[in-house]
Amino acid sequence: MEFEPEDQYAAHRAAARAWVAANVADGWLEEQEVTGNYHTPELHLRLARDDLLGAGWPAEFGGTAVDPGFARAVFQEALGLGLRLDGWFSTEMVLDTVLHVGTDEQKRDMLSAGARGEMVIALGYTEPSCGSDVAAAKTRAVRDGDEWVINGSKMFTSTAQEASHVFLLTRTNVDVPKHRGLTMFMVPLDSPGVEIRPVHTLGGQRTNATFYSDVRIPDQLRIGPVDGGWGVMRVALIYERGLSSPPVGPTWADRGADWARSVSRDDGSRVIDDPVVRERLARIAIESEMTRLLTMRVAWAVQTGAMPAVEGAVLKLLANESAQQHLSALLDLIGEEAVIQDPTSGSFPQAVESSFRKAVFTTIAGGSSEIMREIIAERALGLPKNRPALGRPVAYPLTI
Amino acid sequence: MDLALTDEQRSVQELFADFFSKESPPERVRAAEALGFDQSLWDAVAGVGAITMGLPEDLAGAGASTLDLVLVAEQFGRRIAAVPLIEAMVAAQVLARTEPGQVLLDELAAGTLIPTIALRPLVAGVARLAPAGAVADVLVALDGDELVMVRRDGQRPHQQPQRNLASAPIADWDLSAPSSQRAVLASGQQARGSYSDALSMWRVLTAAALAGLRREALDIAVSYVKVREAFGVPIGHFQAIQHRLADLFGYGDALQLLVYEAGWARDADPARAQALAEMSFLAASEIAFLTCREALQFHGGYGFTLEYDIQMYFRRAKAWPLAIGPLRDSYQHLAGSLFDAPNRQSLQE
């Protein structure tokens, strides 16, 4: 056993920093904070221009000659500045899935468009009436000759306002258990019948509700087999987990300690000298270290070719649950200054306030904490499945 | 980074898993509850070389790494074995570094002498509630500015333990008693440094023991909820139980990584070793007790009876960490390591 963390991208670090310094504009971070739009089109175009988006894909399907390690290092450096690359990450995850399950024509068309920065893909899984129970999707796709006609609605279609396509989970068969009647499509968002409505969130991010009324798309845009959508989604999930990388930079305990050293109470004593503050920060430090180790383990497992299902669930559960508690505790330690909302001010209390709101979604999105507990209970502890509706057909007729 | 145990580490783990499950089944633990010490288990532990395995090969040891000792302590804790193995390993480590201590090494390796360490400095010449104070023959302690060793002869137990939550052989050890043979091992800065390092090692190994303890408590709970029925189904069917067990699995999983890292760091990353020892100790204290508390709760009324094993785990999970003092002091200690150290180094570095 050996715990020394390795920088997989050490060889590319300096070049990646130089790329970011030369290409990331000063105002983008603030713009993302203010607008809640976590996809900066100009950044995306620059990444495409320098062949960073297609790095690692086979050349015959549009892959570029750039070292994927360099591309990954650039993404990390951008994230390290606080920028979000949500549009690219959902696109990459879907195109990796296409590479795995798509036809040669789809691979060629879609990956090359993705590499050129022309294709940005939003995820269309969750619906107004089903989130965690994603296989209960009711959005219908019905075959009509060489085309499919889609009707329904999706919730949390984040970055759809910037995207060219949505990777849409639809129901194509109502006569089988719900997991076996699903099909995935790559739906162009400029298709007639698609409507995008903004949804604003507690964390400041703008997401969307998207609506599909008699949207017609050719069969060539079906990804994977008819009624095989659940299997395609599982591939996408594996790629999502593979993205997990160790948190970079100081922990909330370190940042909290820096803040506590810099501020004094009315009686002149430093906040850092208060034993209650010290104990609270020490507790945060312990849990942050455990999160770091769990993250390292998932990254390590992925590197060694394993599929860390239980390990991924443990990481997601503990990391997000504990981070929420840490931020809440930091607000309590800071007091009245912590309620001021000014995420671009650069001050510690305002960074905590902003992160506190953003963290709320982390225990809900991408598999809620309850789903993670279910995975652990069933797969790691061998406890009985207890979902009442598992495997039964969805109740019809559909009401949308 | 390589988070898999090596083949050698896995064989240490398997050897001691096998050893403690055979030599310290629940009946043996129960039989030893009055004194908290099982002499024949101690002899067996010495027989497999566990007490001095961490010492260099030229000093009656096997040159095992701290991580190896962690793997042993984990299996020891899993079977809540009634021997003072951790204190003996730590005391042996201190003794092996000093001349008066080295004289004893053969007897320590053979198990004929039981060594222990006082986890708090002496007060007026007394080691209050010394671990294994009822049965140990050699005590390492910090007495003011001096790191000292005392030896006593005669039949075990040397005294009766004070009845306690862990059923451990703890007892006050008065070093001023006329029969004590006292030797100074080190003094001044060297004494304090050596003692502090010994406590750090104790924290890591105790964390490992608690990690093993919580693992067995979780296994006991999971097995129980699969067979105990209520309302017509096994109670493991209910989410109120499943989700809490899932949380405990996750905490335990993370704890095990932290404990292994702390063991590894003692040999490989000295800058972070002390903070990681304190972190692993505190995390283990909290998580082991929470696991036992929940496991006992899921037993319902039976959990409250002495007939079921879970209460033996519950009591030790709470009591073991307290041997070194109040947990709040340990949190302050950790805060000092993290936030005040002169060359403060981020753990994220």
Image: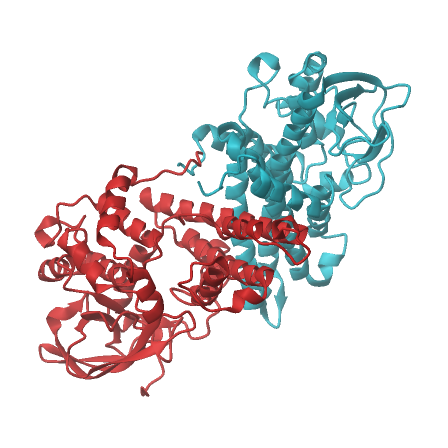
Chain colours: A red, B cyan
Is residue A177 among what the camera can see? no
Please name whichever residue, B332 or B294, is drawn nearer the observer in this view of the structure: B332
Residue A131 appears at what percent x and percent y? Answer: 38, 73
The answer, for residue A387, to whether it is visible in the render is yes
Task: Give coordinates of residue A163: x percent, y percent.
Answer: 21, 69
Q: Is residue B191 left or right of residue B16?
A: right
Residue A350 as seen in the image, left or right of residue A16: right
Residue B230, how many percent across, how many down? Answer: 63, 69
Residue drawn at x 75%, y 28% as measured from the top left: B39
Q: Is residue B46 above or below residue A384?
A: above
Question: What quarter of the picture does the C terminus of chain A occupy?
Answer: bottom left
Give the position of the N terminus of chain A as an image quadrant: top left
- Residue B171: percent from the left, percent from the top? 83, 34
Query: In the picture, residue A156 is in which quadrant?
Result: bottom left
- Tally of numbered discs: 0
Question: A108 left or right of B324?
Answer: left
Residue located at (78% from left, 42% from top): B167
- Please name whichever residue, A57 or A301, is drawn nearer the observer in this view of the structure: A57
Please tell me in which quadrant of the rendered image residue A391 appears: bottom left
Q: Is residue A250 above or below residue A331?
A: above
Q: Quadrant of residue B86?
A: top right
Q: Residue drawn at (78%, 26%), measured in percent from left and top? A: B144
